[in-house]
Amino acid sequence: MLTQPDLPAMLHAQGKVRDIYEAGEHLLFVASDRISAFDHILASTIPDKGKVLTQLSLFWFDFLRGVVPNHVITASVEDYPKPLREFSEQLRGRSMLVRRAKMFPVECVARGYLSGSGWKEYQETGAVCGIKLPIGLRQSDRLPEPIFTPATKSTSGHDINIPFAEMVKVIGQSTAEKLRALTLRIYSLAVDHAQKRGIIIADTKFEFGLIDGNIALADEVLTPDSSRFWPAESYRPGGPQLSYDKQFVRDYLESIRWDKNPPAPALPDHIVQKTREKYIQAYRQLSGKELEL
């Protein structure tokens, strides 16, 4: 279990789950076992969660290598800069050495089903991010076709849905259109793969940046933290779905009526264990491999 790495490197940035370190001309991404919900880091960790996030991202980076470049150099600790190799126990299976990218300040979200913030917005306006949808859709319904719903980060780290026109203002028409097309293409390929493995990818978000002037996929890809994964066998539109992602944790926090203000609560042992099982099962089904523990 890893809450906070202890490395001989300068911390470049820290997210709710990932710690990013300086590694010469490159960066080292380390995924901890921290878990966040409703924009707060919880008092509990989920054992091996960081390994699932890293190894599943690496699976997808490889799966998509013919579609879009990515920032990964290696995930083999033996190939890391020498000072980092001594910390292989902390790093193995949950880290990757990556190229630096100039990141676009926009989250690229693809939705194939009506859930989460999209469902809330649809109930209020009949649209999601300015995209009008058919009348009478139910929660978790499959959309007539996947939609692109970009988002930006506020200072609190909370994603804010924006219309495509707003994205154009931020990064320009041509780049926005390229990212929209790329997002929907990647999502379509991933959905087809996951469907064969018994998983519905209801929605997901990607982050892109520029490396040597070219668009590259970065950060995490199609993980239980960045996506909604539903078991295909239990899919029933008209309400919430069983999931392989952290919706399970959100549902628990809603059930105890946490007011979503700090301090964030700890999770009971059975919720921690069940969440760990869900993350590992998602990795196993999507990759066809066992998690490297």
Image (tube, grey):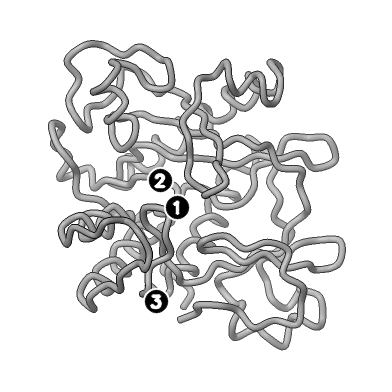
Residue at 48% of width from left, 33% of height from top? 109
Question: Image quarter for residue 54?
Answer: bottom right
Residue 275, x across and y down, in percent:
29, 66
Residue at 34% of width from left, 35% of height from top? 117
Q: Secondary structure at mark 3?
A: loop
User: For mark 3, does the 10 Å Cα neighbourhood hold few (<14), some (14 to 19), or many (20 or more) residues?
Assistant: some
> Gap between marks 1 and 3, in whole Å?
16 Å
For label 1, the residue is 223
For label 3, the residue is 47
Amino acid on which the number 3 mark rests in the picture: Pro
User: For mark 1, does the 10 Å Cα neighbourhood hold few (<14), some (14 to 19), or many (20 or more) residues?
Assistant: many
For label 2, the residue is 227
Question: Image quarter for residue 118?
Answer: top left
Q: Answer with left or right where residue 187 lies relative to residue 28.
A: left
Q: Secondary structure at mark 2?
A: strand
19 vs 158: above or below: below
Residue at 67% of width from left, 85% of height from top? 87
Q: Answer with left or right where residue 238 lies relative to residue 122.
A: left
Question: Image quarter for residue 131?
Answer: top left
Q: Answer with left or right where residue 230 lies relative to residue 3.
A: left
Amino acid on which the number 1 mark rests in the picture: Thr
Residue 218, x across and y down, in percent:
64, 47
Q: How many discs mark residues in the rendered view? A: 3
Q: Secondary structure at mark 1?
A: loop
Residue 201, x across and y down, in percent:
35, 40
Amino acid on which the number 2 mark rests in the picture: Ser
31 vs 98: above or below: below
Q: Viewer-proximal residue, 264 or 95?
A: 264
Residue 127, x across and y down, in percent:
34, 17
> Gap between marks 2 and 1, in whole Å?
6 Å
- Nearer-N-terminus badge (3/2): 3
- Nearer-N-terminus badge (1/3): 3
